[in-house]
Image (cartoon, rainbow, N blue to C red):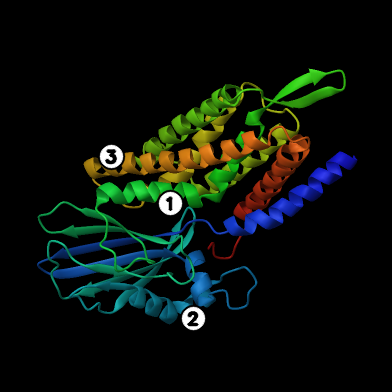
């Protein structure tokens, strides 16, 4: 009982120290600019949950955003979007406003018209949310008559930098999403906590022992990472290509549930089969969580396949750096006497609590989902 209470206290402490830094998921706005002989239209879709820190949309601070609050905030929303989006040589006219319900919440959609025709390499300056959310990105699809769609990832914190070409931008976007994806990272790190240890059955029950050689840790880690990569790559492709579709209202709580189950399995063996197989099954769920980024862009098949390849490459690059750093640290700590109770026990309890909080948050009914 004392050990359980100590783990719970340590887990709560770790939860309070770590989770607030990851509380806000990476955010994306979707921009579509079309230009032809009749002029230019620009549409931007941005999540209300992302606008709330900037504009204080939830006026009564009750955690429930209502239609009335959004209606009263429309002028401020439009003003913020106008200030955060400039197209060189185009003066944006009046906006047509609407709300779009998506799987991950409700988005404010504004569509502008302009009497201008864009050149081959138009300059688009995007600074929305730069001061309140460094994770925010604008995913731009730009179309001109007679030209293939141009894809860009716009970083509001670097508006003066030349927009990267599609080839480089979606690799960076993949890295950005795994590095700022709190739930995916926590799931993966939870699986890695015991990788530098092995469970042995003794007369007193199961006991953790540190591995003796680096290779004893490398192979389990490779199995976990390879299974996660294969699984999320599979469902990322199927879902983003719209061959398999599951609603975010199911996927987001399911991702939180995988964290809870992985954490429980660290504390008490629960899941059947080898760790790599469990990781593969749960990784299928996480792949659906990655898929929404590209699915919203409605790309032609060729451009979509190329963007998907780059995005997944970025995911793997970011994941590899994180895994190498984490495993190196854990291997160095494995021989400490309190590693099983402090790192595996306390870390798993913290992950369990975080996953449970996310599950409740993602299944809680809201008047207007943010």
Q: CA distance from mark 3 to mark 2?
A: 41 Å
Residue 346's disc is: none
Q: Could you say which is closer to the camera, residue 85 or residue 71?
A: 85
Residue 184 seen anywhere in this rendered image of the structure: yes
Image check: 92 left or right of 244? Answer: left
Residue denoted by label 3: 305
Sequence-first tag of 3 and 2: 2
Q: CA distance from mark 3 to mark 1?
A: 19 Å
Sequence-first tag of 2 and 1: 2
Q: Extreme right residue here? A: 1
Task: Give the percent coordinates (x, y) of residue 252.
Answer: 55, 47
Residue 246 seen anywhere in this rendered image of the structure: no
Q: CA distance from mark 2 to mark 1?
A: 34 Å
Task: Give the percent coordinates (x, y) of residue 311.
Answer: 36, 44
Q: Which quarter of the figure has residue 112?
A: bottom left
Please determine whether, in this image, residue 40 is positioned above or below residue 175. below
- Mark whose residue sits in front, 2 or 1: 1
- Mark whose residue sits in front, 3 or 1: 1
Residue pictured at 55% horizontal, 44% vertical: 185
Q: Could you say which is closer to the camera, residue 350 or residue 79?
A: 350
Residue denoted by label 1: 176
Structural crowding at the residue carrying mark 1, measured as other residues with C-alpha within 10 Å and reported as few (<14), some (14–19) or many (≥20) = some
Residue denoted by label 2: 72
Q: Could you say which is closer to the camera, residue 367 or residue 171?
A: 171
Task: Give the percent coordinates (x, y) of residue 20.
Answer: 63, 59
Image check: 195 left or right of 314? Answer: right
């Amino acid at each position: 009982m004392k050990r359980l209470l100590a783990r719970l206290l340590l887990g709560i402490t770790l939860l309070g120290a770590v989770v607030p830094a990851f509380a806000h998921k990476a955010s994306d706005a979707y921009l579509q600019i079309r230009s032809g002989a009749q002029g230019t239209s620009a549409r931007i879709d941005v999540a209300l949950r992302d606008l709330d820190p900037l504009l204080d949309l939830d006026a009564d601070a009750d955690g429930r955003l209502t239609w009335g609050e959004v209606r009263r905030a429309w002028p401020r929303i439009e003003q913020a979007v106008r200030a955060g989006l400039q197209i060189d040589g185009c003066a944006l006219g009046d906006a047509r406003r609407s709300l779009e319900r998506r799987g991950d919440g409700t988005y404010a959609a504004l569509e502008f018209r302009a009497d201008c025709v864009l050149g081959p390499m138009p300059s688009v300056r995007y600074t929305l949310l730069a001061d309140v959310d460094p994770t925010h990105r604008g995913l731009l699809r730009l179309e001109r008559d007679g030209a293939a769609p141009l894809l860009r990832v716009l970083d509001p914190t670097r508006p003066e930098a030349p927009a990267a070409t599609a080839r480089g931008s979606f690799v960076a976007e993949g890295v950005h999403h795994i590095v700022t994806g709190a739930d995916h990272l926590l799931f993966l790190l939870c699986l890695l906590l015991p990788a530098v240890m092995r469970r042995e059955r003794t007369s007193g029950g199961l006991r953790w022992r540190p591995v003796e050689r680096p290779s004893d840790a490398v192979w389990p880690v490779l199995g976990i990472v390879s299974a996660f990569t294969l699984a999320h790559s599979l469902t990322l492709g199927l879902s983003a290509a719209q061959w398999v579709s599951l609603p975010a209202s199911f996927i987001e709580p399911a991702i939180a549930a995988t964290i809870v189950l992985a954490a429980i399995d660290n504390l008490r063996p629960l899941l059947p089969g080898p760790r790599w197989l469990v990781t593969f099954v749960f990784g299928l769920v996480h792949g659906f969580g990655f898929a929404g980024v590209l699915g919203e862009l409605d790309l032609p098949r060729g451009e979509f396949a190329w963007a998907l390849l780059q995005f997944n490459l970025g995911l793997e690059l970011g994941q590899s750096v994180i895994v190498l750093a984490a495993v190196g640290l854990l291997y160095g700590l494995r021989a400490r006497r309190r590693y099983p109770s402090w790192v595996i026990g306390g870390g798993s309890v913290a992950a369990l609590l975080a996953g449970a909080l996310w599950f409740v948050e993602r299944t809680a009914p809201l008047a207007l989902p943010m």
